[in-house]
Amino acid sequence: MAEPATETEPLRPQQPPVHNLWVPISALLLALLLAALDQTIVSTALPTIVSDLGGLEHLSWVVTAYLLASTAATPLWGKLGDMYGRKRFFQASIVIFLVGSALCGLSQNMGELIGFRALQGLGGGGLIVLTQAIVGDLVPPRDRGKYQGLFGAVFGATSVLGPLLGGFFVDQLSWRWVFYINLPIGAVALVAIAVVLHSVEVKRDHRIDYPGIVLIASVATCFVLMTSLGGVTYGWGSWQIIGLGVLGVVLLAAFVLVERRAEEAVLPPRLFRSRTFSLVAVISFVVGFAMFGALTYLPTFLQVVQGVSPTMSGVHMLPMVLGMLVTSIGSGQVVARTGRYRVFPIAGTAVVTVGLVLLSRLTESTSTTVMSLYFLVFGLGLGLVLQVLVLIVQNSVGYQDLGVATASATFFRSIGASFGVSIFGTVFTTGLKHRLADALHGVQLPSGFSAGTILADPRVVQQLPPSVAHGVLHAYASSIAQVFLYAAPVAAVAFVLALFVQEQPLRASVTAPDLSESIGMNPVERSSVDEIARALTVLSSREARRDLYRRITAEAGLDLQPAASWLLLQMHRQGSVEPAELAERGIVPPAVVEAAAREVEGRGLALRNGLPLRLTEPGEQVALRLVAARRSQLASLLGDWDEKQFADLAALLTRLTDSLCGDPHERPDPTPAAHVPHGEGRSF
């Protein structure tokens, strides 16, 4: 969660031409696919993993170990990449991830799997943050929105494909292939990165908050251990559980003290002075809590209680995932168009609460149609808040805190996910033990079966006589339903808190949502200037598809057709242009190019040097006014962030203006302009 290293951060050099940008981009997409897929692919395989390795009470840690490690490692990867070059650390993160994946697949017990999942998470945190940083180094501003959309689509696709692929591998191969599949994909990405990716970034100096990173990871680990072991392995009043709680509180106090003095704090305490940020942090925590708790335990319900295959359990979960994607994308677009956002966290947390109550009504006899409806309601609620929470945070902080606040929104969701999986696991395991004991009391089990074997291996339920299986299935169904019932009041608290979120005028620069920030569980580590650059390039690409040249012509006070302004900026950027060659590219109709050429020649703004057109001195002055108008258009998107206060922000606007002005990819509106009143534009 990095802030700008200095107020006058050096500009990155213009990107060198990449003859085939799709090769490195494809390698980056593969690497991101690894990390994004691993957040969802394991869920449908968990019941089978538990059956094979035993240790149902530790099921939650297969997910939690990965989440905690990747969340803690993300800020470290981002800053090390800034300081020493991203390529080498990106390659290191891939290697660590692949080693962790191979070891996960080779695990012989739950302890090994949990430890190797943590190792895998260390690499996964670097994959996400460094992938997106490298895209900013490689891709010119005009194309960045397109590629960022691709990376967001990867997160959306893996949300759908993850549960399906996890089930498919379990059914057709082995649960171990959930991890082995990473090896060939990662190997291809690693080779491609080594061959085609060349380091072009300017390195930045940072003060890495090592104590803060270690302390926050330790605090989360203590509390997650306490909630997952309490009442299961140790009694709630045991010295082990009390000791973990006390240690967590002490470490939390130390973390707060350290963060107050850190130059680049991983989580600056000043952010919590904003009521909006504090409210959104809690709501994000609850959303992660509910989202991953459900993703972890719904496959167990489907496979054990409903008796469906792992693959079909992934299919049954599609309504939830698709509902989440639809409302996540839709809410972001509505906010961008209307500037109104307060209703979404209120409605979203309300629907999530209703969804959890509905899920708590699941039984062994619930029909597929009813289950799908419950899953859909829950997913729609999650999607309503996922996208908007990031926008609210970005809109509530000053420019200097934009980068760290954006990452913090996802950070709290990741921590919430860790706690959700852990607490859900404790509620489920404790409830199941008691219910199984009641269901099997006085029942004569077949030879080789006991309450312990049923608890350790959920698959044996299918082998029990129907008279016994009915009670066991009811115990499983009731235990999982209780998980959602206990989660509903937590979501209701988030609903109450959402009522206190105040709506503020929305800055245009925060209406370019990033789907990976919304759906991904790892904090997206960008500095404030990087976050603004990402947003402005997306927004400027949108503008270029509308009436950009009409507006900058009017703002410059010129009486020109939009296509003439476009042509002047082409000459300003390239030195000279050949109108016929521009027409051949098909960007603008030939007739429009010819009319624009006649207009600029007729007004003495350009003259021919053979076939090419070149600006005259008056034409250069007009082009400079258009450049200034373009820069003013970009600056207006910043809202109340004054570029005069921040040297890096002013430099970014200048750099983006130079890059975007006269870009041949930007198409002028060929329809006739409503001319501005005659004025200076006629004097050339």
Image (cartoon, grey):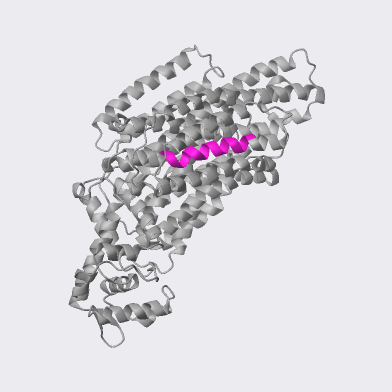
Given residues 293 and 170, the one toward you in this image is: 293
Tell me the residue at 67%/18% (across/down). Answer: 435
| Relative vertical location of residue 173 with respect to residue 550 in this rendering, above or below | above
x and y percent of residue 280 in the render?
40, 33
Q: Is residue 387 magenta?
A: yes
Judge left or right: residue 375 versus residue 539: right
Given residues 472 and 359, the one toward you in this image is: 359
Given residues 5 and 612, the one toward you in this image is: 612
x and y percent of residue 455 in the render?
67, 24
Q: Is residue 56 among the parts visible in the rendering?
A: yes
Given residues 218 and 301, the one toward you in this image is: 301
Say which quarter of the image contains residue 357: top right
Tell me the residue at 37%/44% (across/down). Answer: 525
Q: Is residue 1 among the parts visible in the rendering?
A: no
In this picture, which residue range is highlighted in magenta?
A: 374-389
x and y percent of residue 341 in the render?
42, 40
Location of the N terminus by quadrant is: top left
Dominant SS type (magenta): helix
Name of the residue lying farthest toward the front: 677
Q: Is residue 386 magenta?
A: yes
x and y percent of residue 257 in the render?
27, 26
Say which quarter of the image contains residue 303: top right
Tell me the residue at 37%/20% (across/down). Answer: 249
Say how many tags the image has: 0
Tell me the residue at 49%/11% (across/down). Answer: 237
| Relative vertical location of residue 460 with respect to residue 603 in this rendering, above or below | above
